[in-house]
Amino acid sequence: MNKAIQVFESISKLSLSNLNTPIEQCKRITKDYPKSPRLFIKRDDFIGQLVWGNKLRKLEYSIAEAIAQGADTIITCGAVQSNHARITAQVCKRIGLDCILVQNGEKPKVATGNHKVNLMLNVPIHYVSSREERDSKMNDVYNNLIRSGKKPYLIPLGASNAVGCLGFVNAARELKQQQAEMGIEFDYIIHSTSSGGTQAGLEIGKRLYGLDKIKIIGVSADNSFDQLAQSISSCAEPVLQRLGNPFAIDKSELTVDTNFVGPGYGIASKESAEAIKLFSEHEGILLDNTYTAKAAAGVLDYIAKGKIDVSKNILFWHTGGILSEL
Ligand SMILES: Cc1ncc(COP(=O)(O)O)c(C=O)c1O
């Protein structure tokens, strides 16, 4: 394992974020449940200025690779309110790379949230009408840039690939250190999952850094177990190869809970609306409708129904996203 850790820690990354994001206990939200396990929250909503969230961890690796390859333009995609697309555009402006976005959905009449920031950054946006059209449009943009002598670098949806997910391998390394400092061991990580890179990185990181006790539960924001298991494996397999195959991750070892998607991607459910209310009123923590509120609905359901033993420590990983609500 040491060799694999060495290989991982030698991979170049940029320093874009305030890592070692705080871990805080949520005591007030659990007080009504006499048999509640201890609930903690990992505050990736504190990762940088302007509520950055989980994507910044991934971009530290993706953009480092782009720069190493001599890229001058980053192309990426997402929905019109994509956190990832906005964060990528913002990082590009910060470090002096061009950025082009491909976004599915209609150009909003009134700009809000992430979209409004994209307009302020003044990055070119290509709108496509469906999720399925994103990849072919990104390829067209890529090929046109090559023809015009530019050096584009393509980051897929959510930076969920073998490079981006390294950000969450690094997050597991960070967690190991924080556990030691806090004198605590977590039994569960519960987080929002969608394009799979966050979960892939955490699953690799937990094995690499010996956090074997932790069970990771991805609460789906949209996709089915099969879709997520496929995305997680396609992120993880090339990473494991790069690290010299220190272990394998079988699909049967993954836990994805699809019970909290509700009416659909980005649409509130009764449970997610309740989670937003409880976390803000009891803990002063803001959640977004699309991702973190669905995961929080899962956390609260497990606690309310006694699905996790009172002796356990849960870490709810807050992955950011609140800007899409504003
Ligand atoms: C705030 C937030 N949380 C969670 C996720 C899900 O992460 P992943 O796409 O790596 O599964 C996303 C993805 O867009 C996100 O923006």
Image: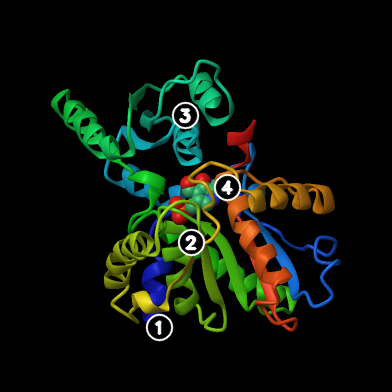
Q: CA distance from mark 3 to mark 4?
A: 18 Å
Instruction: Answer with the quarter of the image where residue 181 lies.
Output: bottom right
Counting the numbered discs, the total is: 4
Q: Amino acid at mark 1?
A: Met
From the viewer's perspective, tell me whether residue 301 is left or right of residue 260: right
The kind of secondary structure element at disc 3 is helix
**Looking at the image, is 69 positioned above or below residue 143?**
below
Circles 1, 2 touching at the beta carbon (< 8 Å):
no
The spot of residue 229 in percent (x, y) is 36, 66
Q: Is mark 2 within 8 Å of ligand 1?
A: no
- Circle 1: is it few (<14), some (14-19), or many (20+) Cα within 10 Å? some
Which residue matches tag 4?
Answer: 53
- Tag shown at residue 187: none
Q: What's the CA distance linking mark 1 and mark 4?
A: 29 Å
> What residue is drawn where x is 34% and y is 55%?
161
Residue 259 locus on image (x, y percent): 53, 61
Of pointers 1 and 2, the one earlier in the residue sequence: 1
Label located before the other in sequence (1 or 3): 1
| Percent of width and height locating residue 105 | 40, 29
Nearest the eye: 99 or 312 = 312
**Amino acid type, label 2:** Thr
Q: For marks 2 and 4, give the one nearer the viewer.
A: 2
The residue that disc 1 covers is 1
Residue type indicated by callout 4: Gly
First-in-chain label (2 vs 4): 4
